[in-house]
Image: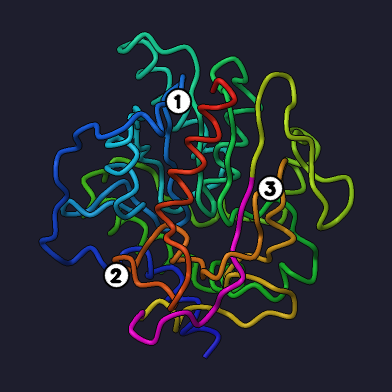
């Protein structure tokens, strides 16, 4: 059962891709999300930019654009270290900056997208206006690492994980992105980042970190839902944990900078509005989170 859950967690982000659903071209309706600097959305482990017109952040880019935001969506390796992914993201940001005359970006990452954008903020702070992580591991204890299905699965079935990453890269049109399961060591990388890129980390476990560090705003959010919708197949992938979590990432371990909220009634897949917006009854709309965060950044002059 643990193996099945691990496989499903890795695959849940792509379950919805085998469909012909598309998105409509965005037209600006309001300026509610019109941030000063563009927003960059960064996917997590086994994620993608889009497949067959379906966004990883389902309906999020289009909604942000309709409300005045300029949005870029990154394409980074599905299976690789956050540092490698961070370098890929940085190169895309430099290209966007050169082509469009952009000085800074508001970075938003889900899951492994969080450590990925922290890397960029650490090595190229002049290009970063803000960092917002959604359900991204920032701190991981030894016990949490030992009990993580993803960590266990990568350690024991690395070649399968790498093949799956290559397949997702291919079907999403980014087959040139390198996949390397041997580079995935979440606990070791987070420990390294705590020394190299400590901005926003809480001084105490489950606390809040500094909101503004050297001109960069840091925010985080996460959920505490596991089984949220009987029709949502991704619920099967969610892991029951000793501490409150979204089924994949411990809520307290996701704290970085100002914690907007760590108890949204969402699981790890709900947090980027998949699978196709299936969330729990009465739960807030995940798309609204990204819209509200854009407005928060706008009001901060970001």
Residue 223, placed above or below residue 228: above
Q: Nearer the viewer, residue 219 or 194?
A: 219
Q: In the image, what residue occupies the spot 52% across and 41% down?
A: 293
Q: Name the element at disc 2.
A: helix
| Figure quadrant of the C terminus | top right
Report which residue position mark 1 lands on: 35
Indicate which disc, 2 or 3, sits on the residue closer to the N terminus. Answer: 2
Q: CA distance from mark 3 to mark 1?
A: 31 Å
**In the image, is residue 136 part of the stretch drawn in magenta?**
no
Can you tell which of label 2 and label 1 is closer to the viewer?
Answer: 1
Q: Which mark is residue 157?
A: none
Q: Nearer the viewer, residue 161 or 205?
A: 205
Q: In the image, what residue occupies the spot 32% across and 35% down?
A: 67
Report which residue position mark 2 lands on: 15
Place of residue 2 in the rendered image (x, y in percent of width and height, measured from the top left):
55, 85
Q: Nearer the viewer, residue 64 or 4?
A: 64
Q: In the image, what residue occupies the spot 34% across and 48% down?
A: 60
Q: Main secondary structure of the magenta part?
A: loop
**In the image, is residue 231 part of the stretch drawn in magenta?**
yes
Report which residue position mark 3 lands on: 189
Judged left or right of residue 249, residue 25 is: left
Q: Nearer the viewer, residue 171 or 176?
A: 171
Judged left or right of residue 142, residue 86 is: left
Residue furthest left in the image = 20
Residue furthest bottom in the image = 1
Kindly check if marks 3 and 1 are in contact, taking CB atoms under 8 A apart as contact. Answer: no
Q: Name the element at disc 3.
A: helix
Q: Name the element at disc 1.
A: loop
Can you tell which of label 3 and label 1 is closer to the viewer?
Answer: 1
Kindly check if marks 2 and 3 are in contact, taking CB atoms under 8 A apart as contact. Answer: no
């Amino acid at each position: 059962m643990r193996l099945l859950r691990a496989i499903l967690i890795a695959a849940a982000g792509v379950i919805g891709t085998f469909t012909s659903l598309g998105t409509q071209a965005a037209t600006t309706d309001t300026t509610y999300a019109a941030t000063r600097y563009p927003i960059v959305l960064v996917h997590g482990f086994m994620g993608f930019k889009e497949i067959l017109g379906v966004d990883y952040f389902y309906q999020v880019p289009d909604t942000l654009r309709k409300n005045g935001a300029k949005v870029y969506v990154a394409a980074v390796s599905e299976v690789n270290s956050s540092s490698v992914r961070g370098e890929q993201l940085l190169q895309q940001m430099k290209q966007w900056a050169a082509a469009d005359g952009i000085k800074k970006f508001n970075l938003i990452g889900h899951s492994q997208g969080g450590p990925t954008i922290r890397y960029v903020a650490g090595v190229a702070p002049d290009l970063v206006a803000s960092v917002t992580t959604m359900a991204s591991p920032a701190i991981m204890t030894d016990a949490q690492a030992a009990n993580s299905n993803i960590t266990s699965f990568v350690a024991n079935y690395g070649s399968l994980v790498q093949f799956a990453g290559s397949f997702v890269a291919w079907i999403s049109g980014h087959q040139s992105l390198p996949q390397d399961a041997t580079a995935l060591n979440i606990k070791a990388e987070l420990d390294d980042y705590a020394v190299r890129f400590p901005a926003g980390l809480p001084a105490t476990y489950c606390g809040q970190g500094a909101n503004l560090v050297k001109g960069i705003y840091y925010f985080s959010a996460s959920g505490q839902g596991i089984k949220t919708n009987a029709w949502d197949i991704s619920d099967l992938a969610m892991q029951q944990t000793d501490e409150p979590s979204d089924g994949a990432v411990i809520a307290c371990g996701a704290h970085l900078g100002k914690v907007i909220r760590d108890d949204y009634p969402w699981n790890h897949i709900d947090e980027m509005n998949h699978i196709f917006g299936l969330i729990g009854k009465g739960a807030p709309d995940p798309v609204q989170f990204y819209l509200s965060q854009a407005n928060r950044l706008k009001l901060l002059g970001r």
